[in-house]
Image: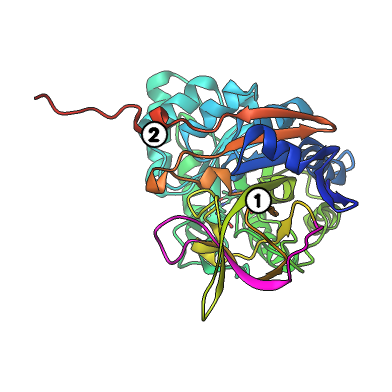
Amino acid sequence: MDFFNYRQTKLFAEDSAVDDIAAEFGTPCYVYSRATLERHWRAFDDAFNGYPHLICYAVKANSNLAILNLLARLGSGFDIVSVGEMQRVLAAGGMPEKIVFSGVGKREDEIRAALQVGIRCFNVEVSGELDRINRLAGELGVIAPVSFRVNPDVDAKTHPYISTGLKENKFGIDIQSAIHEYRRAAHMPNIKIVGIDCHIGSQLTETSPFLDAMDRVLALVDQLQSEGISLHHLDLGGGLGICYRDEQPPLPAEYVSALLDKLGGRGFEIMLEPGRAIVGNAGILLTKVEYLKPTAGKNFAIVDAAMNDLVRPSLYGAWQDIIPADEYSKAEPLTWDIVGPVCETGDFLGKNRELKIAPGDLLAVRSAGAYGFTMSSNYNSRPRPAEVMVDGAQVHLIRERESFEQLWAGEKLLPV
Ligand code: LLP
């Protein structure tokens, strides 16, 4: 459930009309709902019902400082994949001891920085990374907490680009070799084994792949236990899907209770790394219709947002709902392709949408809170959009629209 609803004909974000937001902050503009964001985070947290756990929000989904700060205030942990994300979390008031560091390519400077601030755990994904962490921890005179991200080879039944738990994917350590890595780690002077981790993909709409992965992970955990290698936590990654169109993913409560049942009384702390399920439906992208261009083959509505602002439709063929900011219109309903001004045929936000639109109308692309702004770029020298957070009737600017000077900040001319 989210807080983007119509009142009479006008679309509201909580108690704020989105056309007023567009008038004040311009378009394109990302609009987030604080109530939705907090409700979704709490849905995960409450689902544990007192069972020891930590929700580590996946920063990559949306890394705006205001969002990280609101989640930190709720007590959230964070899943990061770069030192840049770590710096954002710290700048937003997140606690180092609630940060887990995932990712297949951690550089030396990133590991060192994470060791210096004292993060909760490294999710090790490559054999060589373990040696690197041990050596760097030794140099700094600290003990590094590690968990291995294992690749359980299960089919997440999602888009191939966002499936990560198959043996042909680059992620994690294959589950057969993991035991060997744990044995090595157990003998390293500057490593402390704290957990095990897996993340099998994103936008999963069923519980069964998570449970299949957990079966395989638990078999390994039991084997480790029998060798005297005991773990403190089990991190099951992120991946719970959301409703973009007609998907019916399990609710966080159903998902968590299935995981706890599967755990069968093993007393681990459970960690999760949800991103999309927390922030995806907490955001929309507001855009204005610039021109209508009916042609013999297609009707194009050219809007002021483009693939550089929201790349999911172009990159994955993702379907995101596109709705008018004002349902009242004298225009005839027609089928439109909603396209941006970028010079690529693949620049579209939606295809074949039945809408009543006229130039100057405002449209909202729904479910744009996750992997929207974070995947945006400056392609075609387009300044990135503003971001605002609605809190009831108040609207806070949480990122200014980029200026032209910011487009070339840091660039240098050659000497004459
Ligand atoms: N943990 C790890 C290690 C991950 O790689 C990811 C996402 C997550 C957690 C969070 O997954 P979520 O709960 O958001 O599904 N750009 C794509 C999604 C890429 C996901 C990458 N990893 C999209 O727009 O659909």
Q: Is residue 64 above or below residue 163?
A: above
How far apart marks 2 and 1 lie (CA) works out to 23 Å
Counting residues from the start of the chain, the first of labels 2 and 1 encountered is 1
- Give the percent coordinates (x, y) of residue 375: 51, 47
The residue at the point 71 percent across, 56 percent down is 240
* Amino acid type, label 2: Leu
Q: Nearer the viewer, mark 2 or mark 1?
A: 2
Q: Nearer the viewer, residue 237 or 121?
A: 237
- Residue 269 in view of the camera: no
Mark 2 element type = helix
Label of residue 407 in the image: 2
Range drawn in magenta: 327-347
Magenta stretch containing residue 337, yes or no?
Answer: yes
- Give the percent coordinates (x, y) of residue 150: 55, 55
The residue at the point 80 percent across, 44 percent down is 40
Q: Is residue 295 above or below residue 144?
A: below
Mark 1 element type = loop
Magenta: main secondary structure: loop
